[in-house]
Amino acid sequence: MQKLWLGTILVLIGLGIYSLYGYLRLESPPIEEEIDLSPLPTAQFVSAPGVNPNEIVIGSSLALGGHASFLGTQYLHGAMCLINHINSEGGIHMRKIRLIAYDDEYDPPRCVANTKKLIDNDKVFCLFCYVGTPTSVKIIDIVEENKIPLLGLFTGADKLRFPFRHYIFNVRSSYYHETQAVVRYFIEKKGLSRIAVFYQYDDYGFDGLKGTQIALQKYNLFPVTTGSFERGTLEIKEALDKIQSSKAEAVVMIGTYSPCAKFIKEARAMGYNPLFHNVSFVGADKLVQELGDAGEGVLITQVVPPPTERILLPATDQYCRLLTKYYPQDKPNFVSFEGFINAKILIEALRRAGRDISRESFIRALESIREHYVGIGASINFGPRDHQGMDDVYLTQVKNGQLQLLLYK
């Protein structure tokens, strides 16, 4: 009994430390510039698109249907449960937030069309909560040409971060951060060196592949082999045969939940059991559901802490309560919790920008957010030349059908 109590106390201490400082934190370079948040001179102020006396209109294109619908739907629900709550209290500066969301089914041409419609027809103030690399990278030029802010993307793509982009703000960590963290775990903690990559054959997969290659190079290693599949398909056999033949001890997987689940289940059925890892975009909760018993031991890097840790992290308690209120059919999950965190940043920036808001004052308000705590332990940090809010990575593992935070020194 004493050992049990001691173990419980040690776990709680560990979680407390993690809640204060994040986990596997990778520091961003400090920004020394000061930000001027004073209003623009009256002669320069022009009413911003999407802003009227009673509301501010924002827009989103994301996968609400198709093979990645869980990701888009949950991302949207997480953000909307907080936005609905804020609107119920009167909004921000006496304006309610209205979000127009269009379904792109994780298809790049549809995302482009939706974005143009949001800007040209709906006249939205800003873009918010986009989902996916192949979709989001296709609108970079549109965003910059129209000088419209884009905040909160469910992607860790490097193209959205480098070179620096004035109008794009990423809250979550990059895929490079995620692959660096798991490669370090494979090599330094598990003693593995034969690492393969299974990836979606598009910008998303290429980004994860490159991130893994960069991480391995630090140890003078390279992938023992790679295998790919086409986005929107479940054609994984060729890649599985190739990776199995390489005798890889671990597989970094860059895909969505269904093809990754099929790969893992078929590998296990063949008696091939390397250590499997998925990046956060996979949709951890949906992946675990599809894997069933085959999920035991699978690793997933996350960019937000566990959404069910309600005791130590205030944001998770608020998130769970609001999700139950506005979307009672949903269960707390990593994807919607990330959307919820995005909404917290959106609301904070709208507050800081003030009643006489413009797109540029909104951008300056976002850039003023430094060492800002939203109740998840880790802080959010932006700056005039730093639009990467968080660099934290949380390593989780499937144990007995549940996602558990994997604590290690």
Image (cartoon, rainbow, N blue to C red):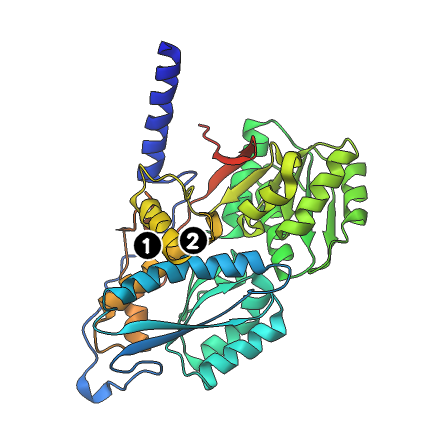
Task: Using the image, tell me which numbered label, if any, was put on residue 328.
Answer: 2
Measured in 3D between alpha carbons, the distance from the residue under mark 2 to the one under mark 1, in whole angstroms, is 32 Å
Q: Residue at x 28, y 55 (%)?
A: 370
The answer to whether any part of residue 223 appears in the image is no
Provide the residue designation for mark 1. Answer: 381
Q: Residue at x 64, y 30 (%)?
A: 192
Q: Residue at x 63, y 38 (%)?
A: 292
Q: Amino acid at mark 2?
A: Pro
Give the residue at the far top of this rendering: 2
Question: Disc 2 or 1, which lies upstream in sequence?
Answer: 2
Q: Residue at x 28, y 85 (%)?
A: 47
Which image quarter is the N terminus in? top left
Question: Does residue 59 lie above or below 317 as drawn?
Answer: below
Label tally: 2
Q: Indicate the quadrant where residue 268 lies.
A: top right
Q: Amino acid at mark 1?
A: Asn
Q: Indicate the quadrant where residue 167 lies.
A: bottom left
- The reply, left or right, for residue 39 in relation to residue 124 is left
